[in-house]
Structure formats: C-alpha cells, structure tokens
C-alpha cells in the first residue's frame, strides 16, 4: 500500500481540475478519473465510482457535478468553487476565442465549408453516443418502445422537455421495475 | 436587448435541472428554445456552434457558453454558462453527504435503470435534431454516417475524426 497523500488544498483542487479541463478532448471523465484516482490519489477507485454514481444520478453535466462534489468533500463551498473554476476556466476561454475566430472568418467560403464538414461529423458524434447508450436496450423491447416514444415526442412533435420528462420518466421507471420482476 | 440576459438565465437554469443522464439529453430542448421559442439563430447556426464547442476541450456543455456569447456577448456567455451549471451544482453540493447514506438503497438503482430508456431516447432525439440541420446535402448526410461508424469503431481519436471531417469540408466535399 502506498501511503495516503495529504488532502488537497484549494489550490491543488483548482490546478488539478485545470489540467483536466485542458486535456479533456472528446470526453472529460476518463481524464478526471486519471487525475483523481491514479495520479493525485485523492480518492480510491471505489470512492470515485461511488461519487460518480451521485453525479450521474443528479441532473447536470456529470464532470461538473463531480468537481463540485469532490471540492466540497475537502473544503466545503470554497473547495467546490475552486474545483469548479479550475475545470471551467480554460475551456471557456478557449471556446470564446474559437467563437470570436468563427465570427471573424466564418463568412470565408473555405471556412464555411470546413464548418459544414465539422458540423456533419459532430452530428455523427451525438449519433454514436446515442447508439452506445441504446446498446443495452437490444434485449429490452419495452425499453426500446419508451426510447422510441421519447425520441418522437422530442424530435418529431417537438414537445417541451419538461412535459416529456414529467410523463415519460415515471412511466419508464414504472414499467422497467415491473418488467424486472 | 434588455430582456435577453434574464431570458438566457431562465432557459439555461431550467435546462440545468432537467439534464438527467448528462448534458446530451437537453440538446434538442436547447435547440428548440434558442431557434424556435426565441428566434435567436437558425438551426444551422446552432449546429455550427455545437460543432465548435466539440472542437474545444472541456465539458461537453460549452455550447451554452457559445450560445450566450452569440446572443448577448461576453455577459451572455457568463450568464448562460453560469445558469446551466449553477442550479445542478448547488443540488450536487447539498446532496453529496446525503448520498453516502443512501448508496446501498435499492431505489437508487431502480430509478437509474428506469430512466435509461428515456435518456437513450433523448440523446437519439439530439442526434436527429442536429443531423437534420447539418445534412445540407446527401454528401453531408453520408459524412455524418461515416463519422458515426468511425466514432463507434473507436480506432481513431474522436478529435482526429472531427478534424478530418473539417478538412473534407474545406476541400469542397460537402455543401
């Protein structure tokens, strides 16, 4: 067993998540796990999985919830704020810089065409994510039905999300529980 | 413009608390709010901003920063990002120690497993809504399908796939 490292300071939390924010191309969670569990050993693998469970259960971007939960565990409100700001600082600055460049050069024909290609691939990224999430439903016809109704209500009928969630979430939990018995 | 910042705050704060299953589930509602309910941009612009956010590192909901920025400048970027991350963060802060107490309760698993089909449907809806506006012609639609297969195969890094698609677009293969 390696000796337990001292608990992180607010500065450590900020810097640790700053590194995660900068690295996290195409998904931040693997990088967050690497930093928290493997490199800095703030949490054990089991503790990390448990905390991640909470962050996936609650609404909101998972990795942002994770920064808040971890920061607050060590230093309350100021710890949560340190980790959160560390995570968001660099990506926000970079994305605003990209936005400014796009506003400046977006009208240029080559840039415009590059964006059509990039945007088409970004749609593919969401489609691939959706297919991966849906894969466990293959053996679950009731689940496929619920997913299909949700898809149609949002993408075809374009109903507001609060209404769809209010109807589909309880229904889905109810039928999934009954089917599991 | 005076009502724009409060409107941005209201939209993204609501989305923050509705984002069960992570950020991708609120994508179609975000698009509906900023292109239909408020005519701030075209669906094509929304798709371009989403793509731009994917090209930056960090949490995948940075599209809120870009939408805020596009609609109301720097203040809009801060308001939209703050509203999207604030309410869920406050909720996380207050439930973090409660959670430990409930971690072995079966209802936790029941709710999570029960929400899975809804999450899958919502993310698929996001893909449909985006693909509808990025498929400017059949070649763009084909590029989306090829990119999907490459992302699924996981042989190439996602950023490389996005970069290759941008190059393909710049060479005039799309549009």
Image: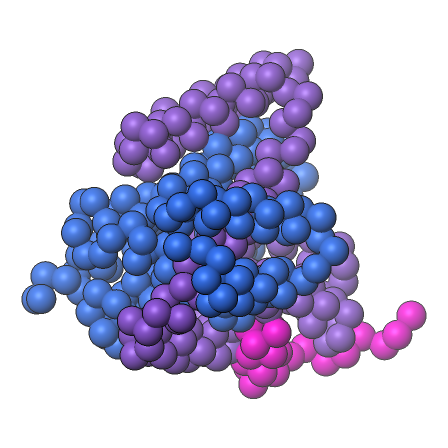
Chain colours: A purple, B blue
Residue A150 position within the rendered picture, expressed as x and y whole percent measured from the top left? 42, 28
Total numbered labels: 0
Residue situated furthest left in the rendering: B2
B171 shown above or below A46: below
Residue B45 position within the rendered picture, expressed as x and y whole percent measured from the top left? 30, 58
Q: Is residue B13 left or right of residue A37?
A: left
Nearest to the observer: residue A158 or residue B52: B52
Q: Main secondary structure of the magenta part?
A: helix
Nearest to the observer: residue B109 or residue A175: A175
Q: Is residue B92 left or right of residue B39?
A: right
Residue A62 position within the rendered picture, expressed as x and y whole percent measured from the top left? 53, 55
Q: Is residue B159 something one can see in this rendering?
A: yes
Residue A146 position within the rendered picture, expressed as x and y whole percent measured from the top left? 49, 22
Residue A7 picture quarter: bottom right
Residue situated furthest front in the rendering: B172
Q: Residue at x 37, y 60 (%)?
A: B48
A84 shown above or below B63: below
The magenta stretch is A1-23
Residue situated furthest bottom in the rendering: A11
Asked if the magenta segment contains residue B94, the reply would be: no
Nearest to the observer: residue B25 or residue A128: A128
Q: Is residue B160 left or right of residue A99?
A: right
Q: Is residue A47 left or right of residue B112?
A: right
Q: Residue at x 74, y 56 (%)?
A: B155
Residue situated furthest right in the rendering: A1
The quarter of the image holding the C terminus of chain B is: bottom left
Q: Is residue B99 something one can see in this rendering?
A: no
Asked if the magenta segment contains residue A2, the reply would be: yes
Q: Residue at x 76, y 75 (%)?
A: A39
Q: Residue at x 9, y 66 (%)?
A: B1
């Amino acid at each position: 067993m390696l000796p337990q490292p001292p608990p992180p300071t607010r500065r450590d939390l900020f810097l640790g998540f700053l590194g995660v924010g900068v690295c996290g191309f195409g998904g931040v969670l693997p990088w967050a796990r690497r930093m928290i569990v493997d490199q800095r050993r703030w949490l054990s693998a089991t503790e990390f999985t448990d905390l991640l469970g909470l962050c996936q259960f609650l609404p909101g971007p998972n990795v942002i919830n994770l920064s808040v939960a971890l920061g607050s565990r060590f230093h309350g409100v100021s710890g949560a704020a340190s980790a959160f700001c560390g995570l968001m600082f660099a990506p926000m600055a970079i994305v605003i810089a990209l936005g400014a460049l796009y506003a400046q050069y977006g009208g240029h024909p080559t840039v415009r065409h590059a964006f059509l290609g990039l945007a088409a691939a970004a749609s593919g990224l969401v489609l691939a994510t959706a297919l991966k999430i849906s894969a466990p439903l293959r053996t679950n016809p009731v689940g496929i039905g619920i997913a299909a109704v949700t898809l149609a209500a949002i993408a075809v009928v374009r109903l507001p999300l609060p209404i769809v969630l209010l109807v589909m979430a309880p229904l889905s939990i109810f039928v999934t529980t009954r089917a599991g018995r | 413009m005076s009502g724009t910042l409060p409107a941005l705050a209201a939209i993204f704060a609501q989305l923050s608390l509705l984002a069960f299953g992570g950020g991708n589930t609120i994508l179609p509602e975000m698009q509906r709010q900023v292109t239909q309910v408020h005519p701030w941009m075209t669906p094509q612009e929304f798709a371009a901003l989403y793509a731009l956010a994917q090209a930056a590192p960090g949490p995948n909901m940075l599209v809120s920063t870009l939408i805020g920025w596009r609609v109301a400048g720097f203040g809009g970027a801060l308001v939209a990002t703050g509203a999207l991350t604030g309410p869920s963060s406050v909720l996380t802060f207050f439930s973090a120690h409660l959670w430990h107490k409930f971690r072995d309760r079966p209802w936790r698993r029941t709710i999570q497993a029960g929400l899975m089909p809804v999450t899958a449907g919502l993310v698929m809806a996001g893909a449909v809504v985006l693909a509808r506006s990025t498929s400017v012609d059949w070649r763009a639609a084909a590029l989306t399908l090829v990119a999907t297969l490459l992302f699924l195969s996981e042989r190439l890094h996602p950023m490389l796939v996005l970069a290759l698609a941008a190059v393909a677009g710049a060479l005039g293969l799309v549009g």
